[in-house]
Amino acid sequence: MKTTPVSLIQSQNITKSPGKKIDSETSSESFSKILAKSIEEVNKLQKQADKAIEKLATGEAEEISQAMIAMEKANLSFQLMTQVRNKIVEAYKEIMRMPV
């Protein structure tokens, strides 16, 4: 098996991802819009989990696995959102501590 030496890899231009074009719309999208979309997605997953639990409780859904998957998706997305919020608050506090 042929391997490329590390020195050759470092000399290559790796600033652009091959095959990915940066769309001007996505690059100009503000942080607040991205954050709002993420919160909406988390809310959607929470609502889907609530519906799955409701269907399971009323007997409409026969498979408990689907409800559990929906609950885990909602839980993981909420945990991720919480961690992102914590990092944002941490970054804000760090900026506020900087001397002017």
Image (tube, grey):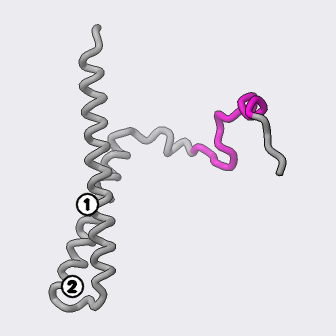
Extreme residue in the left direction: 58
The numbered mark at residue 70 is none
Amino acid type at mark 1:
Asn
Residue 90 in the image: x percent, y percent?
27, 31
Which residue in the structure is indicated by mark 2?
56
Residue 58 drawn above or below residue 92? below
Q: Which residue occupies 24% across, 65% down?
A: 46
**Residue 19 is one of the magenta-drawn residues:** yes
Q: Quarter of the image holding residue 88?
A: top left
Q: CA distance from mark 2 to mark 1?
A: 20 Å
Q: Quarter of the image holding residue 53?
A: bottom left
Q: Which residues are magenta?
A: 6-22
Q: Which residue occupies 21% across, 85% down?
A: 56
The numbered mark at residue 43 is 1
Mark 2 is surrounded, within 10 Å at the Cα level, by few (under 14), some (14 to 19) or many (20 or more) other residues, namely some
Q: How many marks?
A: 2
Q: Quarter of the image holding residue 72?
A: bottom left
Mark 1 is surrounded, within 10 Å at the Cα level, by few (under 14), some (14 to 19) or many (20 or more) other residues, namely some
Front-most of 6 and 26?
6
Amino acid type at mark 2:
Leu
Compared across the picture, whether 43 is left or right of 19 comes to left
